Image (cartoon, grey):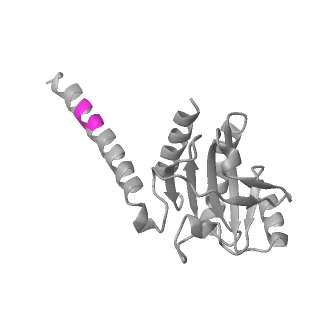
Amino acid sequence: MKRVAPCLTNILMVYTILLFVQTNLYAQNEQKDRGFIVEVGEEAPNIILPLLSGDTLSLAALKGKVVVLQFTASWCSVCRKEMPHLEQEVWQAYKDDDFVLIGVDIDEDPNKVSPFIEKMQVTYPIALDTDKKLFYQFARPKAGVTRNIVIDKEGEVVFLTRLFDPVEFDAMKSKISTLLN
């Protein structure tokens, strides 16, 4: 009887892991239903990011780095929930590697964005997308704002998130770690 329990425990553990992997693979393969117009495996559009600081960055100039674009807005409660996790668990963890996290604030006046970023205690760079043109290169119009796009060192989209799901967020962190190691 004692030999059956460890075997059953191992079977349950394997089943749980397979269910987790299947769920994440399904989520990554069903992005169109989540408002994305880009897909995993595609080259990311070469956008120019006007930063809140006044500088600009292009995705082409960031090749050789792992890039996360985090679409956000001050009025978005889910974004506010996710931002501290991005700051602590992603930006602070990888900012000294070949990595950049850029928050892209959509459809807001820069005078509103600065106090929002200060209040959220975000230290990663913030880009402005006042007319949603950057957002529309990754997601359909009227698609919800809270999303992250992970781009590998070659400029390919490798992971997409929508809303703030802790399981998906952890899978994204794992993907970033793998890309950097």
Looking at the rendering, the stretch of residues picked out in magenta corresponds to: 10-14
**Residue farthest toward the bottom in the current orientation of the protein:** 142
Q: Is residue 180 above or below residue 152?
A: above
Q: Quadrant of residue 30?
A: bottom left
Pick the quarter of the image with the N terminus: top left
State left or right for residue 148 relative to residue 132.
Answer: left
Residue 129, can we see it? yes
Q: Is residue 18 above or below residue 135?
A: above
Q: Quadrant of residue 173?
A: top right
**Residue farthest toward the left in the current orientation of the protein:** 1
Q: Is residue 127 above or below residue 123?
A: below
Residue at 68% over, 33% down: 97
**Residue 21 image position (x, y, % from top left):** 35, 44
**Residue 36 image position (x, y, % from top left):** 49, 65
> Mostly what secondary structure, the magenta segment?
helix
**Residue 172 image position (x, y, % from top left):** 52, 46
How many labels, in total? Answer: 0
Q: Nearer the viewer, residue 81 or 34?
A: 34
Q: Verify whether residue 11 appears in magenta.
A: yes
Residue at 68% over, 73% down: 75
**Residue 178 image position (x, y, % from top left):** 52, 34
Residue 87, can we see it? no
State left or right for residue 152 relative to residue 58.
Answer: left
Residue at 51% over, 45% down: 170
State left or right for residue 23 relative to residue 78.
Answer: left
Pick the quarter of the image with the C terminus: top right
Q: Verify whether residue 81 appears in magenta.
A: no
